Amino acid sequence: MEKKPRKRKPLNVKLDTKKIDVEITRDENGNVTVDVDTPKIDAHFTKDENGTKLTVEVEDGKFYEFESNGENPKLPKGIWKITGEMVKLFVKRGFGKLKK
């Protein structure tokens, strides 16, 4: 007996507050899109038949807390306050992560 793909109910949720904006949409095929906008970062999440994808936007001029893992000898392990431009570079090279 062949199983039919399950149709999901479409979903559209919007939450708008002073500090955070969230929008969640899902279609009948199960494809999901989530957008989160906060004063510090903007995140966009998508899930479809190709898999999941998370994109985080960091502004270059703002300061963020970065947690170093000690991989770089000139960047000891600890929490550093650095610009968004440097956060992108350090995360790409695997020197640590953006602290939430």
Image (spheres, grey):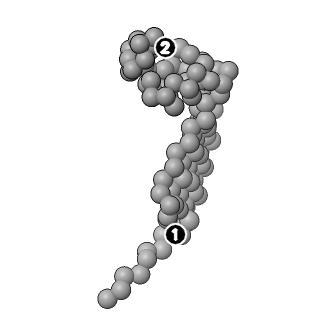
The residue that label 1 is drawn on is 29
Relative image position of residue 79 (x, y in whole percent)? 44, 15
Question: Can you say whether 23 is above or below 78 in the image?
Answer: below
Q: Earlier in the sequence, mark 1 or mark 2?
A: 1
Residue plotted at (45% across, 11% down): 74
Q: Which residue position holds label 2?
A: 80
At horizontal 53% and vertical 14% (from top left) the residue drawn is: 81
Please name whichever residue, 45 or 19, is drawn nearer the observer in this view of the structure. 45
Give the percent coordinates (x, y) of residue 90.
Answer: 51, 24
Spot the residue most to the bottom.
Answer: 1
Circle 1 packing at 10 Å, graded few (<14), some (14-19), many (20+), is some
**Mark 1: secondary structure:** loop
Q: Give yes or no for contact between labels 1 and 2 (Cβ–Cβ under 8 Å).
A: no
Amino acid residing under circle 2? Trp
Q: Which residue does the image show at 41% across and 13% down from the upper left?
A: 73
Q: Residues within 10 Å of mark 2 (few under 14, many from 20)?
A: some
Residue type indicated by callout 1 = Asn
In the image, residue 77 lies at what x, y percent? 38, 14
